[in-house]
Image (tube, rainbow, N blue to C red):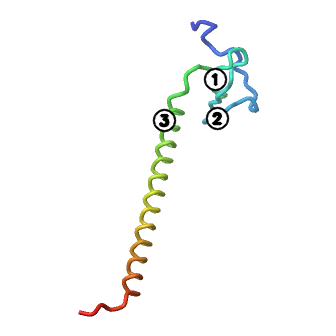
Amino acid sequence: MADPASVPEDPSVPEDESLATFGNWRAVASRTRGHVYYYNVRTNKSQWEKPKKWIIHDARLEEKGRIEHELQMTREKERNVKNEVKTALRSEQEKPPSDV
């Protein structure tokens, strides 16, 4: 049996007191300590550790955001290179022919 001090104090969490949600889980601020704990509304289970599936989900979202940012930066670099090439070609075309 768990030590009562180690389990969050109020597993009945109104929806509006949740800090974040993932599936049946709610992140909730402890009223007495102010620490975040996690409460499953389906099983009535509460725990201090973030559920593993939630951690994996967050990591995937973070990785997706990083990849999207890198893709955006790559596209921006490609646009810049294309613009530089266009500018160089234009300036070559505008040059008067050189006497040989």
Label at residue 21: 2
Q: Earlier in the sequence, mark 2 or mark 1?
A: 2
> Are discs 2 and 3 less than 8 Å apart at CB?
no
> Are discs 2 and 1 less than 8 Å apart at CB?
no
- Mark 2 vs mark 1: give the one in front: 1
- Circle 1: residue type: Val
Mark-to-mark CA distance, 2 and 3: 14 Å
- Mark 3 vs mark 1: give the one in front: 1
Extreme left residue here? 100
What residue is pinned by disc 1? 36
- Circle 2: residue type: Thr
Mark-to-mark CA distance, 2 and 1: 12 Å
| Quarter the N terminus occupies | top right
* Residue 62 vertical placement versus 67 (above, below): above
User: Measured from the top left, where is residue 87 in percent x and y?
Assistant: 43, 77
In the image, taking residue 41 as reference, residue 88 lies left or right, namely left
Residue at coordinates 73% horizontally, 22% vertically from top-left? 12
In the depicted view, which residue is nearer to us: 40 or 9?
9
* Element on which disc 3 rests: helix
* Element on which disc 1 rests: strand
